[in-house]
């Protein structure tokens, strides 16, 4: 299968790209930064801003599926990365007859998501970090989800919980709408997306993904994912 990966040079996109190549797929790695994705057999690099319809159109042409792992950091100002890229990507897919789309969103997009047994997270961290510091980011994620739901594509909205780095795939679980857990390793997120690409259990649905066997430090997670500049 020939897969376009948006955000291929990002922390989740790198996992998706590597795992897809290992599985034998051809990958079109879509990035804004030339030289940020090392050359490998089976890999084509497409330079494109994911919010530029013309550039996205060229990247999507000739692919069988699109996986988007685009992301940005918290910002007090308005964020439009998610919704603008969704509009450009879905438009290009429709024009080229590419039907399968998997897009990374967040468990926060489910208003009823409250992981069980996580009192401190639910009552302190979530209101402070996700609902306040990350408010504009998650508002745009919801706009992205609404835009994608309005298409005729075979989409899956992939909703991880708190993302963290782990070098390899571990045990994870998926569930419709959102999954019961606080953390998701990026390697597991990538694996779940590629598995769903083959299995098609959550077509035109949201798929929650949580890691079940590894637990990171919450303090380090907040610093690395929401505060520290890279």
Image: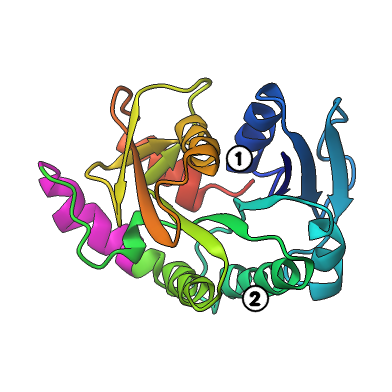
Q: Nearer the viewer, mark 2 or mark 1?
A: 2
Res 21 quadrant in image: top right
Q: Position of residue 8 (x, y in %)?
A: 71, 44
Q: Where 187 sits versus 230, above or below?
A: above
Q: Which color scheme did the rendering employ for the protein?
A: rainbow
Residue annotated with mark 2: 87
Earlier residue among tags 2 and 1:
1
Distance from the alpha carbon under mark 2 to that under mark 1? 23 Å
Q: Residues within 10 Å of mark 1 (few under 14, many from 20)?
A: some
Residue 165 shows in this picture: yes
As helix, strand or loop, the secondary structure at mark 1 comes to: helix
Residue annotated with mark 1: 11
Residue 121 is a magenta residue: yes
The magenta segment: 117-131
As helix, strand or loop, the secondary structure at mark 2 comes to: helix
Q: Where 58 sits versus 19, above or below?
A: below
Magenta segment, prevailing SS (helix, strand or loop): helix
């Amino acid at each position: 299968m020939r897969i376009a990966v948006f955000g291929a040079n990002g922390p989740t996109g790198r996992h998706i790209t590597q795992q897809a190549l290992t599985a034998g797929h051809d990958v079109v790695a879509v990035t804004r930064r030339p030289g940020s994705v090392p050359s490998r057999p089976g890999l084509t690099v497409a330079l494109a801003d994911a919010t530029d319809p013309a550039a996205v159109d060229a990247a999507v042409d000739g692919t069988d599926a699109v996986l988007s792992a685009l992301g940005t950091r918290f910002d007090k100002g308005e964020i439009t990365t998610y919704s603008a890229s969704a509009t450009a990507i879905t438009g290009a897919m429709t024009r080229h007859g590419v039907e399968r789309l998997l897009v990374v969103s967040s468990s926060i997009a489910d208003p009823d998501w409250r992981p069980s047994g996580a009192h401190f997270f639910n009552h302190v961290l979530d209101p402070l970090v996700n609902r306040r510091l990350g408010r504009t980011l998650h508002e745009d994620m919801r706009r992205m989800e609404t835009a994608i739901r309005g298409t005729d594509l075979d989409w899956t909205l992939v909703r991880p919980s708190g993302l963290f780095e782990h070098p390899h795939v571990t045990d994870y679980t998926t569930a419709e709408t959102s999954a019961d857990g606080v953390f998701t390793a990026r390697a597991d997120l990538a694996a779940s997306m590629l598995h769903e690409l083959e299995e098609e259990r959550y077509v035109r649905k949201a798929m929650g993904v949580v890691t079940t066997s590894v637990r990171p430090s919450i303090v380090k997670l907040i610093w690395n994912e929401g505060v520290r500049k890279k």
